[in-house]
């Protein structure tokens, strides 16, 4: 998912906070968030500009959940002021200390033609260690442009490291493999790493991706805030 309030930062990915069915104590919850740079899988989705977001989730005691999330992309200086809207549903739970989350998410974009695509995903966590895999299963993206059916994203994380004074550290890494190369034969595949220091609703992140494919390789410093109610 690209949700900032999840927080769509990969560093928070696969920690227990990702499992919507566990987070939402009520049947319906809402979330809002803001970040200085919307980073998803190591790549800025907002042209390195600030982004705001909000979402609505439904969670059943059985473990079923569904929701939607909207985030802003770009700014006036980048020449793009579109939005991303995610629609998702899935099932999560825990057995013998192992937490799991399986579902489907659809990414829809305004002001971007032929950019929408959908994924099935599985996330797992045992203690502070997490892992996940997401596979693109449907796409409107033209052949050779990336984000087509068959793309796979792998991720691992270790979170909840106590730094004292209610600060926590989370570490994560991901690998994005694309089913096809670009029209010019370029290899889109790239890897990335990220570290997050969080306290309460605030998170400071450092993200670095390979200078390959869709990633620019620049070191990213990001401050984010998000809450749910």
Image (cartoon, rainbow, N blue to C red):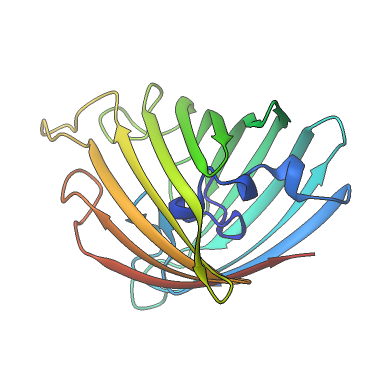
Q: Is residue 50 left or right of residue 68?
A: left
User: Residue 220 falls in which quadrant of the image?
Assistant: bottom left
Query: In the image shown, does 26 or 2 lie closer to the viewer?
Result: 26
User: Residue 173 falls in which quadrant of the image?
Assistant: top left
Q: In percent of the image, x 73 and y 31: which residue is there? A: 93
Q: Is residue 12 above or below residue 187?
A: below
Query: In the image shown, does 99 or 141 lie closer to the viewer?
Result: 99
Which quadrant is the N terminus positioned in? top right
Q: In percent of the image, x 53 and y 44: which residue is there? A: 128
Q: Is residue 101 above or below residue 39?
A: above
Query: Where residue 38 appears, x then y in whole percent?
Result: 44, 63
Q: Is residue 188 above or below residue 194?
A: above
Q: Is residue 44 left or right of residue 13?
A: left
Total marks placed: 0
Query: Where residue 180 appears, x then y in whole percent?
Result: 25, 25
Query: Where residue 196 appears, x then y in whole percent?
Result: 43, 62
Query: Where residue 92 appears, x then y in whole percent?
Result: 71, 32
Q: In percent of the image, x 63 and y 50: which residue is there? A: 17
Which quadrant is the C terminus positioned in? bottom right
Query: In the image shown, does 81 or 149 lie closer to the viewer?
Result: 149
Q: In percent of the image, x 60 and y 54: which residue is there? A: 6
């Amino acid at each position: 998912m690209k949700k900032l309030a999840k927080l769509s930062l990969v560093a928070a990915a696969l920690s227990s906070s990702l499992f919507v069915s566990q987070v939402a104590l009520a049947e319906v919850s809402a979330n809002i968030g803001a970040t200085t740079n919307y980073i998803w899988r190591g790549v800025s989705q907002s042209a390195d500009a600030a982004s705001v977001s909000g979402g609505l989730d439904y969670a059943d005691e059985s473990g079923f959940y569904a929701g939607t999330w909207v985030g802003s992309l770009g700014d006036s200086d980048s020449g793009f002021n579109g939005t991303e809207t995610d629609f998702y549903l899935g099932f999560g739970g825990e057995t013998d200390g192992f937490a799991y989350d399986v579902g489907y998410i659809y990414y829809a974009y305004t002001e971007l033609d032929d950019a929408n695509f959908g994924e099935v995903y599985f996330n797992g966590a045992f203690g502070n260690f997490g892992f996940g895999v997401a596979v693109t299963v449907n796409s409107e993206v033209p052949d050779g442009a990336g984000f087509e059916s068959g793309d796979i994203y792998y991720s691992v994380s270790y979170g909840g490291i106590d730094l004292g004074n209610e600060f926590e550290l989370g570490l994560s890494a991901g690998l994005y493999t694309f089913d096809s190369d670009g029209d010019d034969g370029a290899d889109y595949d790239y890897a990335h790493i990220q570290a997050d220091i969080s306290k309460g609703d605030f998170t400071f992140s450092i993200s670095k991706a390979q200078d390959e494919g869709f990633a620019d390789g620049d070191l990213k410093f990001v401050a984010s805030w998000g809450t749910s109610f």
